[in-house]
Image (cartoon, grey):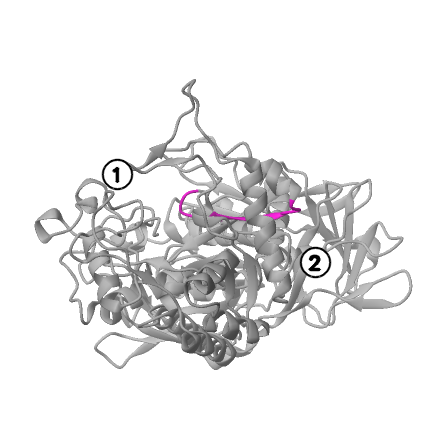
């Protein structure tokens, strides 16, 4: 989904969006106003925090009440509803509680919530609760660890809020040394109107029970979740979309899609090879001058043909960040021929192409590489010596001209500099090259690639916005599996095991207990870990691209197993209605820009969204496009006729929305009504302390893939 492509610039005044809801039997003047905002009541547990994080990621407004704070507002009738312009107002369209009753026996707050939910047909999610009759369930068939369990979506779940999944909901088991999941499997209580949506079989047994289900009672609807999770775990990432969709009844401000894009840097160039004896890369800055023999890794024509075939077969257009000067240098050294470039240019339509500068020089400060680590060269007055604006201009324009001659399908607004140079890099260069911004302006660059491990946020650099890219730990200086494993061992093992000792001083998520086997370590460890990390990014609704290097598509072609495992896993988890969205760099940058503007408006309290009867109105600052999710078939009312709203994804329509020509508002007509509640049952008592949910260490603090119990830290920067 390209949200920005749908968001035309708005004129002066507030953005007003009218979204038509199905008519209700009462007269329009009697219809209450329902604010499109979620109330999240938290006790500090990871489950409510995960749902809040998902709402935040989707751009859905919510208000948090922390039960641990003494000065928190009381949840009573006045807090939940009031009157605006003479009309009754429900301040929240949905409620999230940490369990089915976190307030205590006989709580006036729960009674107020129950009355509110009945009056306004407001659904409630019990983020993680004990299985008991008050939640529509029998006592648990099983309570305990769910690490490695394969849960499944039921037929009702597939027909309802979880129809975007292919069926399986596998629970992570990233470390045998750490408990990561815990839950209760239970059957519906006798006589309860309870519909299981996700079920599992007890580990080591045959009894099945619900993990996620809907309980209808007393004119209310509750989504009852009986396992604990945090926002990063795969099992939550899989159900998060369905939880929010159920919570908002399929009509909400905010949207989410799953993204995956892969950039391949240094195409046409040659990458220096890791030396397994010296533990550095001769010819590059990590080897002292004069050490080792420089040895380049470069794709062959056969590698190029395979890349095109693989891209077509997997449906993933690789973004080739190319250096035209690399081809010209090869021709000079090889009698004027470059079969690799000829093959890639012949297959140019199989790929997307990104300007990566002509010769891939470092465009920040002038580097002094006489020692390791390198430093910035200095002018006579002691100031930093920077690469000139002219040099940056030449690198961008010469490469663009090369690509134009080769008829590459370019977007001239995209640029990735070599090593993301020109941008600040710590500790050597704490500021951007001051010549970078004007050079970007000279060349019309709007989207500049950056390293997400250094700068995860999008920022302005002259006329350009950065597009943070995830580095994959498939190293630029490895063309063979043994080289990749050897370098991985060097970085992530102790000095006593022959490693760098990095993990002894500052543990990171990929640290190893012992060195990997050079023959089997890549397939058995690195591929599963790196693919799990990349898949986690994709499932989080994060559009940022990943990047590898052309060396990883050469020789042993070590990049493909990681990418294949990501794609295979996704296809096994999601239905065809929920494909990976594969945006090119400019569209990713625009998406991040639109999100930042929307999030800023939400954070400043400058967005108002509500529905009255069959109309939803959203008011936001001028120039800020709104994002929404509606039922498939929703139509936008225009001055003359109608148009489609958004585009289909995961069984809904979603997108950025702005007024049509000559309009100051958008009206959307929905094809069907949101679900209504049914009666039966009563208000639950408080959950007894002895039965309150157990939270294992791996849910309280996430254990990343393959860490074997190491304390989680930020991911390594890669190469």
Is residue 452 within the magenta segment? yes
Image position, residue 455 (x, y; %): 45, 42
Q: Looking at the image, do the residues carrying marks 1 and 2 touch, with CB atoms under 8 Å apart?
A: no
Whether residue 77 can be seen here: no
Please tell me whether mark 2 sits on a helix, a strand or a loop.
helix
Please tell me whether mark 1 sits on a helix, a strand or a loop.
loop
Residue drawn at (57%, 49%), measured in percent from left and top? 396
The residue pinned by badge 2 equals 5
Q: Total label count? A: 2
Residue drawn at (49%, 36%), measured in percent from left and top? 387
Direction top: furthest residue: 381
Judged left or right of residue 504, residue 528 is: right
Image position, residue 399 (x, y; %): 57, 55
The boundaries of the magenta stretch are: 443-454
The residue pinned by badge 1 equals 372
Crowd around label 1: few <14 · some 14–19 · many ≥20 (10 Å): few
């Amino acid at each position: 989904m390209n949200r920005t492509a749908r968001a035309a610039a708005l004129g002066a005044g507030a953005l007003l969006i009218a979204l038509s809801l199905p008519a209700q039997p009462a007269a329009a003047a009697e219809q209450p106003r329902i604010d499109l905002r979620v109330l999240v009541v938290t006790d500090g547990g990871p489950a409510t925090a995960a749902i809040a994080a998902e709402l935040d990621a989707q751009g859905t407004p919510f208000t948090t009440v922390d039960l641990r704070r003494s000065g928190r507002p009381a949840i009573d009738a006045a807090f939940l509803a009031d009157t605006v312009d003479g009309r009754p107002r429900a301040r929240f369209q949905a409620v999230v509680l940490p369990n089915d009753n976190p307030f205590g026996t006989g709580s006036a707050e729960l009674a107020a919530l129950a009355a509110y939910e009945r009056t306004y047909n407001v659904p409630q999610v019990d983020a993680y609760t004990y299985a008991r009759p008050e939640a529509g369930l029998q006592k648990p068939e099983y309570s305990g660890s769910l690490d490695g369990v394969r849960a499944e979506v039921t037929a009702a779940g597939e027909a309802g809020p979880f129809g975007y999944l292919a069926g399986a909901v596998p629970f992570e088991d990233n470390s045998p040394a750490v408990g990561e999941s815990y839950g209760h499997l239970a059957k519906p209580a006798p006589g309860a109107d309870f519909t299981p949506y996700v079920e599992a079989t007890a580990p080591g047994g045959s009894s099945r029970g619900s993990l996620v289900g809907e309980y209808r009672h007393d004119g209310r609807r509750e989504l009852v979740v009986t396992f604990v999770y945090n926002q990063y775990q795969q099992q939550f990432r899989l159900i998060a979309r369905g939880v929010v969709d159920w919570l908002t009844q399929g009509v909400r401000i905010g949207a989410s899609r799953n993204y995956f894009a892969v950039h391949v840097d240094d195409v046409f160039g040659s990458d220096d090879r890791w030396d397994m004896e010296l533990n550095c890369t001769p010819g590059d800055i990590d080897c002292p001058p004069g050490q080792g023999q420089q040895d380049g890794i470069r794709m062959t024509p056969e590698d190029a043909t395979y890349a095109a075939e693989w891209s077509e077969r997997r449906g993933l257009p690789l973004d080739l960040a190319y250096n035209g000067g690399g081809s010209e240098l090869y021709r000079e050294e090889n009698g004027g021929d470059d079969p690799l470039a000829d093959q890639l240019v012949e297959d140019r339509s199989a790929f997307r192409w990104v300007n990566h500068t002509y010769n891939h020089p470092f465009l920040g400060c002038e580097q002094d590489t006489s020692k390791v680590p390198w430093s910035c060269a200095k002018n006579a007055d002691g100031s930093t010596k920077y690469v000139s604006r002219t040099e940056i201009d030449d690198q961008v324009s010469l490469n663009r001209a090369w690509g134009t001659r080769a008829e590459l399908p370019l977007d001239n607004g995209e640029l990735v500099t070599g090593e993301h140079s020109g941008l600040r890099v710590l500790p050597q260069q704490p500021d951007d090259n001051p010549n970078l911004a004007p050079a970007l302006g000279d060349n019309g660059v709007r989207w500049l690639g950056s390293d997400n491990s250094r700068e995860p946020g999008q920022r302005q650099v002259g006329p350009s916005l950065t597009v943070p890219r995830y580095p994959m730990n498939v190293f630029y200086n490895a063309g063979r599996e043994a080289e990749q494993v050897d370098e991985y061992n060097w970085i992530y093992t102790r000095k006593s095991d022959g490693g760098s000792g990095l993990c002894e001083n500052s543990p990171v998520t990929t640290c190893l207990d012992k060195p990997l086997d050079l023959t089997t370590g890549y397939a058995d460890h690195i591929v599963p870990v790196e693919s799990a990390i990349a898949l986690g990014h994709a499932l989080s609704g994060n559009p940022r691209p990943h990047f590898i290097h052309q060396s990883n598509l050469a020789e042993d072609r070590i990049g493909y197993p990681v990418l294949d495992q990501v794609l295979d896993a996704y296809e096994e988890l999601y239905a065809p209605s929920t494909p990976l969205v594969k945006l090119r760099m400019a569209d990713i940058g625009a998406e991040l820009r639109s999100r930042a503007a929307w999030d800023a408006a939400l954070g400043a309290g400058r967005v108002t969204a509500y529905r009255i009867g069959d109309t939803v109105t959203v008011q936001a600052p001028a120039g800020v496009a709104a994002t929404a999710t509606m039922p498939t078939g929703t139509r936008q009312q225009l001055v003359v006729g109608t148009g489609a709203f958004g585009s289909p994804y995961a069984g809904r329509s979603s997108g950025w929305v702005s007024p049509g020509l000559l309009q100051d508002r958008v009206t959307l007509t929905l094809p069907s009504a949101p679900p209504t509640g049914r009666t039966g049952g009563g208000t639950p008592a408080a959950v007894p302390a002895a039965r309150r949910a157990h939270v294992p260490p791996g849910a309280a603090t996430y254990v990343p893939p393959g860490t074997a119990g190491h304390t989680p830290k930020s991911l390594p920067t890669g190469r």
